[in-house]
Image (cartoon, helix red, strand yellow):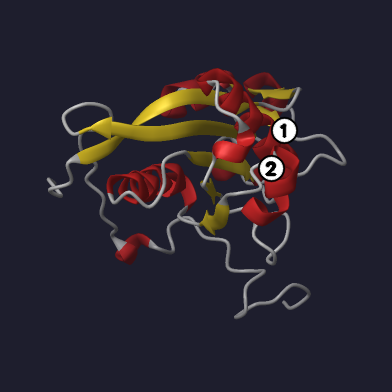
Amino acid sequence: MHDGFQTTARIAGLGRFLPEKIVTNQDLEKIVDTSDEWITTRTGIKERRKVAEGEALVDLVVRAGKAALEDAGVEAEAVDLLIVATATPDQPIPATSAIAQPQLGVVNAACFDLSAACSGFTYSLNVARQFIATGTAKNVLVIGAECLTRYTNWDDRKTCVLFGDGAGAVLLQPSPAGEGILQIDWRTDGTWADFISMPGGGSRFPPGSQ
């Protein structure tokens, strides 16, 4: 998909943060009817991380974001856009990005969240690239983060083996077309929307309803 822009974006810095607690496949063997061999052959997963009590999504976001800024050698005040990709925010309002903004020190950045589940980070990357390509932004911090273990049903062996917590971040800057991010092809097939879903907690089934 060629969009005709003369400028694209490049990754100038990378950052990540993982909670300390590790949940191994052997740990899950004690909870549900599964095995390390079953999980590994079907998913490739050996372990996943889990946030501690009192640790929130915004904590992961801030740690990963600061690491990306340090890696890029960019001052926080130079960031003009912050995008946080998450499906597990600490609260519905305000956006996680707005909560993280003062902690990150990106006081000059416009902030918004993007929710697209597993594809949220790549969607955010493309949105950020277009902000840079149009000249609207020069330093964009994109952070993907989830606290999925807070929503995981640990009695469901089909899903509890899949999900963990963590955050990854990139600092994007302008780059001539032909370098940096060359192409992103994105699409959605909403006919599979119920395949993995979390119906509770929204306006249809608000918190506290059955």
Q: Amino acid at mark 2?
A: Thr
Q: Foreground residue, 31 or 201?
A: 201
Residue 20 pos. (x, y %):
76, 22
Q: Are marks 2 and 1 in contact (CB under 8 Å)?
A: yes
At horizontal 31% and vertical 66% (from top left) the residue drawn is: 191
Q: What residue sits 64% from the left and 45% below the top? A: 148
Does the rendering let one see residue 150?
no
Mark 2 to mark 1 CA distance (whole Å): 6 Å
Looking at this view, is 207 or 91 the one in front? 91
Observer-nearest residue: 100 or 158?
Answer: 100
Q: Quadrant of the C terminus?
A: bottom right
> What residue would you read off at disc 1?
50
* Rendering quarter of residue 199: bottom right
Query: Is 153 on the left or on the right of 170, as rendered?
Result: right
Q: Secondary structure at mark 1?
A: strand
On screen, residue 107 above or below 17 = below
Q: Amino acid at mark 1?
A: Lys
In the image, what residue occupies the spot 70% across and 40% down? 105
Label located before the other in sequence (2 or 1): 1
Q: Residue 139 in the image: x percent, y percent?
A: 46, 38
Crowd rating for badge 2 (residues with CA inside 10 Å; few <14, some 14–19, many 20+): some
Q: Is residue 147 left or right of residue 43?
A: right
Residue at image mark 2: 149
Numbered disc 2: secondary structure: helix
Q: Position of residue 182 (x, y in %)?
A: 21, 33
